[in-house]
Image: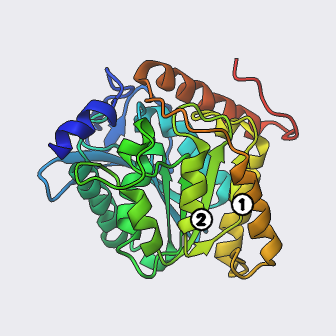
């Protein structure tokens, strides 16, 4: 029943997928089609313990100390995220592993909560075994629905470097209804898992998010053990946060802080910051609990990636780029 509920309101894989796969003659190297091929990107097929085979891409950044494991949002696949992943790796100076959930892109199987948990576990094991990445050098990044597998894995790892939650959900049911307690049939019970995360947590959420209300991000931030100063993007919606200059600036500051060991959590900061953020949270509008629509969200996601790349290749980062 849980999987049935999940399939009805949580998963909207792009149909058709935005990319294809091919095997290069001679080298037998796996390639993605419909994207600009880049030598610093490995394309992989990974088997999960639940019997599906997922597609992942690993973006290499020379000299990088940290690796970002990115779980993307709904109505997107790694073909649509391809340029953003490459740009984030460059700007943040990290290696980056992105992947498609079962049933997304060219990954086999069907989307389900349990499958996404197996998916991220397979990707994590690939980072450790294939690329030799240590747990303490990994930053988990979960966007929207991707906050589910991100927090499932983060709650089990004691030496993880950090977690970034981008427009996260409290739980699947809470996106649709303002329930006050967790039901057994709910999915992605992030509200119950966030207190188990031992590492620093950064939350980024738009104040005008009409898919997952900003109150979700606010409550997850309040429940975090190690709170890093959050970013409430004024006017930001669900699929456009990358267009705001404060997004990449704040994210880069966070990555630099945890890499250099100079991170200061809100617990260690003056109490005034916590009070200030609480006051801001109380002013947030009441949740609308809208369900994410696949077509519109996909269009927004594609425009968001293109504009993010354009904005960060521009010499002037001071102005927000127009989505159109």
Circle 2 is placed at which residue position?
A: 222
In the image, residue 92 above or below residue 237: below
Residue 283 coordinates in the image, percent (x, y): 73, 46
Under circle 2, the secondary element is helix
Residue 76 coordinates in the image, percent (x, y): 43, 33
Marking on residue 195: none
Which quarter of the rendered picture does the N terminus lie within? Answer: top left
Image point (56%, 38%), residue name: 287
Residue 114 coordinates in the image, percent (x, y): 22, 53
Graded by Cα atoms within 10 Å as few (under 14), some (14 to 19) or many (20 or more), the crowding at tag 1 reads: some
Circle 1 is placed at which residue position?
A: 278
The answer to whether one can see residue 98 in this image is no
Camera-nearest residue between 169 and 174: 174
Image point (42%, 74%), residue name: 196
Do the residues bearing badges 1 and 2 touch, measured as CB atoms within 8 Å?
Answer: yes
Which quarter of the rendered picture does the C terminus lie within? Answer: top right
In the image, residue 77 above or below residue 222: above
The answer to whether one can see residue 323 in this image is yes
Camera-nearest residue between 52 and 213: 213
Image point (35%, 48%), residue name: 56
Which quadrant holds residue 261?
bottom right
Graded by Cα atoms within 10 Å as few (under 14), some (14 to 19) or many (20 or more), the crowding at tag 2 reads: some
Which quadrant holds residue 134?
bottom left
Image point (50%, 42%), residue name: 38
Camera-nearest residue between 210 and 286: 286
Under circle 1, the secondary element is helix
Left or right for 199, reference 32: right
In the image, residue 322 above or below residue 260: above
């Amino acid at each position: 029943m849980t999987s049935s509920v999940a399939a009805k309101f949580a998963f909207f894989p792009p149909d058709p997928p935005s990319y294809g796969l091919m095997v290069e003659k001679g080298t037998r190297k796996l390639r993605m089609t419909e994207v600009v091929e880049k030598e610093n990107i490995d394309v992989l097929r990974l088997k999960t313990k639940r019997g599906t085979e997922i597609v992942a891409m690993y973006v290499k950044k020379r000299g990088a100390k940290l690796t970002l494991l990115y779980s993307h949002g709904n109505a997107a696949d790694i073909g649509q995220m391809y340029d953003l992943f490459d740009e984030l790796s460059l700007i943040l100076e990290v290696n980056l592993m992105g992947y498609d959930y079962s049933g997304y892109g060219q990954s086999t199987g069907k989307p389900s909560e349990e499958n996404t948990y197996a998916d991220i576990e397979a990707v994590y094991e690939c980072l450790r075994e294939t690329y030799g990445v240590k747990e303490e050098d990994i930053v988990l990044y979960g966007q929207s629905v991707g906050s589910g597998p991100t927090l499932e894995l983060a709650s089990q790892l004691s030496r993880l470097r950090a977690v970034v939650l981008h427009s996260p959900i409290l739980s699947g049911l809470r996106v649709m209804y303002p329930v006050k307690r967790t039901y057994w049939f709910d999915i992605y019970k992030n509200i119950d898992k966030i207190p188990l995360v031992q590492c620093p947590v950064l939350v980024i959420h738009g104040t005008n998010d009409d898919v997952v209300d900003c109150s979700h991000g606010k409550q997850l931030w309040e429940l975090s053990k190690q709170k890093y100063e959050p970013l409430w993007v004024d006017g930001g919606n669900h699929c456009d946060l990358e267009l705001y200059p404060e997004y990449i600036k704040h994210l880069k500051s966070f990555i630099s802080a945890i890499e250099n060991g100079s991170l200061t959590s809100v617990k260690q900061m003056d109490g005034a910051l916590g009070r200030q953020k609480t006051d801001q949270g109380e002013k947030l509008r009441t949740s609308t609990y809208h369900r994410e629509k696949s077509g519109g969200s996909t269009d927004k996601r594609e425009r968001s990636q293109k504009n993010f790349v354009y904005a960060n290749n521009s010499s002037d980062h001071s102005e927000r780029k127009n989505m159109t």
